[in-house]
Amino acid sequence: MEFSRAKRRVPRPDMMPMIDVVFFLLIFFMLFTTIRTTPMGMDVELPRAVSGVPQQSAQFEVSVNRDGAFYVDGRSVTGPELRAHIEQALQANPDLFVIVRADRQVRYEHVVSALDHVRAVGGSKLGLAVEQES
């Protein structure tokens, strides 16, 4: 008498929960990378100029928004804090080139104030950021 053995089924892991987890991870990383790659600067509408020349050695940027507030690395700073940042950068590099990025609609006195803060701590290489006209 011959008995046939029932074929044993090999247990397989259920793939549906793993697919869900991978899908959620994919969505998470897609959202995280799009948020992470957005520039962390402030929206400054630069004036246009024909004679604008790109600066390769721009090592320090000061942004001035429409209200006259100063920004360094996307953070709002006061006048004395701006001087401290520039002074610290000048100690590390005495040939520092400072670019002032002022909004097109900012009052002229705010731009002059930013330039005064740079000059007060010994910054002698200054530039104004412009958008090059085509």
Image: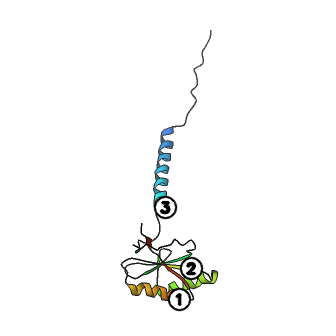
Amino acid type of the residue that numbered disc 1 sits on in the rendered structure:
Arg
Amino acid type of the residue that numbered disc 3 sits on in the rendered structure:
Thr
Circles 1, 3 touching at the beta carbon (< 8 Å) = no
Quadrant of residue 112 in the image? bottom left
Disc 2 designates what residue? 97
Q: Which mark is residue 32?
A: none
* Residue at image point 38% right, 77% down: 104
Question: x and y percent of residue 115 in the render?
Answer: 48, 86
Amino acid type of the residue that numbered disc 2 sits on in the rendered structure:
Phe
Disc 1 designates what residue? 119
Q: Secondary structure at mark 2?
A: strand
Of residues 134 and 62, the one drawn nearer to the viewer in this rendering: 134
* Residue at image point 56% right, 27% down: 9
Quarter of the image that includes the C terminus? bottom left
Circles 2, 3 touching at the beta carbon (< 8 Å) = no
Q: CA distance from mark 2 to mark 1?
A: 12 Å
Of residues 120 and 41, the one drawn nearer to the viewer in this rendering: 120
